Image (tube, rainbow, N blue to C red):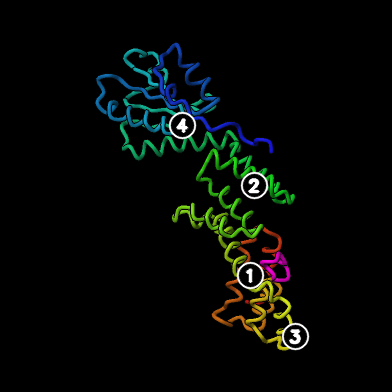
Amino acid sequence: MEPILGGAAAPADTANLVKNGSTATFMADVVDASHDTAVVVDFWAPWCGPCKQLGPALEKAVRDARGAVRMVKINIDENPELAQQMRIQSIPAVYAFRDGRPVDGFVGALPESQVKQFVSRLAAGAAAAAGPSPIEEALALAQEALQAGDSARAANIYTQILQHEPANLDAIAGLARLAVARKDFAKARQLLDRVPKESAGHAEVAAARAALELAEAGQKSQGAVGELRQRLQRNAGDHEARYELASALFAAGERGQAVDELLDLVKRDRKWNDEAARKQLVKFFEAMGHGDPLTVAARKRLSSILFS
């Protein structure tokens, strides 16, 4: 399978992210460069105490942005005409340039946390202006492969993404879903166990975990589908049989029939077993994805039953 992403991800070159500028280089270093990436300009002077506090914090935040933002330092004692042109009245004074013009700024020394927020906003804006990243494009390709039924290609793309970003939650969840589809539940659980607890609510991770739990539960009753149907033929009010049948059908890929059985159960007795049918439907929706056409249609039908 051809590589979707380039070679191993190289760390950003942070050596040239901060430079000293001057009146002569301002156009190239700031105005022209800001068309490619956001540029922070720090107007300072050697005698300025707050400048000595702000400068290092600003440089650190810029380097931590890994190339999304650059910084140019202007000594106003050496470049008084530039300071006059920029109407610098007190220092430290910081301006952020993008697309050739100032878009943000502040005067005075800020706490390090606020400096980080300032630079982070610029980095986020630059990322948005640049469009989707290679990782985001690769995730979209993997989704297209899944929709086309090409599981091997999707798995290859997700694997490549994790080689570049080992903690990418969408790729981990994607591989876990593929493992569930081929009934390799141990592999799916191993992948999901890599997800930090604080990220358990991530939409794709939660969906993959729901799919795994449903598949494991449904597999136990898959062989009993015929028997469960016979039980319902003998007694349509056998709620436990209908519930188990829905789980088995979902695990077998018969999602529409599974949803129908649970909706029928909700209609017959919505409070049965502490609303087990409704809760199972919610888990179905989570596993299928909230934008899935079957989820959307089933939600409407469920609302109609509950509020009738």
In this figure, what is the number of numbered marks? 4
| Amino acid type of the residue that numbered disc 4 sits on in the rendered structure | Arg
- Residues at circles 3 and 4 in contact by the CB criterion of under 8 Å: no
Q: Earlier in the sequence, mark 2 or mark 1?
A: 2
Q: What residue did someone put label 4 on?
A: 66
Indicate whether residue 213 is drawn in magenta: no
Inspect the magenta stretch and tell me whether residue 254 lies in it. yes
Q: Amino acid at mark 2?
A: Ala
Contact? badges 2 and 4 (CB < 8 Å)? no
Categorize mark 3 by other alpha carbons within 10 Å: few (<14), some (14-19), many (20+).
few
Where disc 2 sits, the SS reads helix
Q: CA distance from mark 2 to mark 4?
A: 29 Å
> Which quadrant holds residue 308?
bottom right
Residue 114, percent across and down?
Answer: 36, 39
Q: Amino acid at mark 3?
A: Gln
Is residue 226 visible to us here? yes
How far across and down, in percent of the image, does residue 192 sit?
A: 52, 55
